[in-house]
Amino acid sequence: MDVIYWLIPSMIFVGVVLVILLMIGVKSGQFEDLEGEGQRILFDEDQEKSPSKKNTK
């Protein structure tokens, strides 16, 4: 029973810290582009960097 007396306040403290970290992440723009990273993995960046081939006819 003595464990509950320090466990509940410590979990409330951890919860408050996590909410503060979430608010900091939202304000800094961390969650603005949720689909961008998922779409970027589908495209090959090497194709964009390769030199263009010109027809010399």
Image: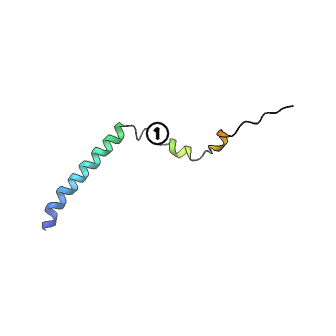
Specify whether 49 is left or right of 3.
right
In the picture, which quadrant includes the C terminus?
top right
Residue shown at 25% from the left, 51% from the top: 15
> From this viewpoint, which residue is outermost toward the top?
57
| Residue 39 x/y as whole percent | 55, 44
What's the amino acid at mark 1?
A: Asp
Viewer-proximal residue among 52 and 34? 52
SS category of the residue bearing label 1: loop
Quarter residue 47 falls in = top right
Q: Residue at x 19, y 61 (%)?
A: 7
Left of 16 or right of it: where is 5? left
Q: Position of residue 29 (x, y in %)?
A: 39, 37
**Drawn side of residue 35 relative to residue 20, left or right:** right
- Where does residue 37 sit, x and y in percent of width and height? 51, 44
Which quadrant of the rendered structure holds the N terminus?
bottom left
Q: Quadrant of residue 4?
A: bottom left
What residue is drawn where x is 84% and y is 32%? 56
Looking at the image, how many numbered discs can be counted on the residues? Answer: 1
Q: Establish if 3 lies above or below 30.
A: below
Reply above or below: 11 against 26.
Answer: below
In the rendered image, which residue does mark 1 sit on?
33
Structural crowding at the residue carrying mark 1, measured as other residues with C-alpha within 10 Å and reported as few (<14), some (14–19) or many (≥20): few
Q: Residue furthest bottom?
A: 1
